[in-house]
Amino acid sequence: MSITLTYGATTIDLTDRLDWTDEFDWTPVEQATAYSITGALLVDVAVKQAGRPITLEGVETAAWITRATCTQLQAWAALPGAQFELTLRGVTRAVIFDHGQGGFNAQPLWVLADGEYTPELTYMPTFRFLEILEI
């Protein structure tokens, strides 16, 4: 299954080799506990409405993207409050870049001289998103 990121009418096909590193680190249940002045335990429980982190990481052996794609993604990440549709494992989710955790970054697989960088050069990306309520 392909992974895509859509903004408006433009869709970028990302590699399906990206690893969803925090897929099972999140729970939809929020719970807070406190003791009353009588010593009774008070428990508040609710279902979170949004905010699931989605971190997608490339590795040195897979999940590469081109420099041209990095340039487009960096421009999208620079749009304050921009909302995107991320299709991952057959499910479309409304997301924003999680700038508090770094948003988007990419590292070149090879260190080259300045004049050797081309739009086809491959990079290892990391995406940090927050799932939000539907757009």
Image (tube, rainbow, N blue to C red):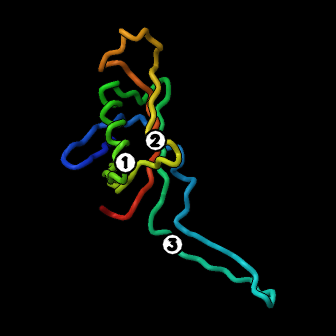
Q: Position of residue 22 (x, y in %)?
A: 54, 48
Amino acid on which disc 2 is placed: Leu
Q: Residues within 10 Å of mark 1 (few under 14, many from 20)?
A: some
Where the N terminus falls, by quadrant? top left
Query: Residue under circle 2?
Result: 56
| Front position in the image: 126 or 1 | 126
Q: Position of residue 23 (x, y in %)?
A: 51, 50
| Front position in the image: 4 or 50 | 50
Query: Residue under circle 1?
Result: 88
Amino acid on which disc 3 is placed: Val
Q: Earlier in the sequence, mark 2 or mark 1?
A: 2
Amino acid on which disc 1 is placed: Leu
Give the spatial CA distance, label 3 vs label 2. 24 Å
Q: In the picture, residue 132 is in which quadrant?
A: bottom left
State the residue at coordinates (33%, 63%). Answer: 134
Q: Nearer the viewer, mark 2 or mark 1?
A: 2
Q: Residue lying farthest left?
A: 9
| Front position in the image: 61 or 105 | 105
Q: Earlier in the sequence, mark 3 or mark 2?
A: 3
Relative to 45, say whether 26 is above or below: above
Res. 47 mark: 3
State the residue at coordinates (24%, 42%). Answer: 11
Say whether marks 2 and 1 touch (CB < 8 Å): yes
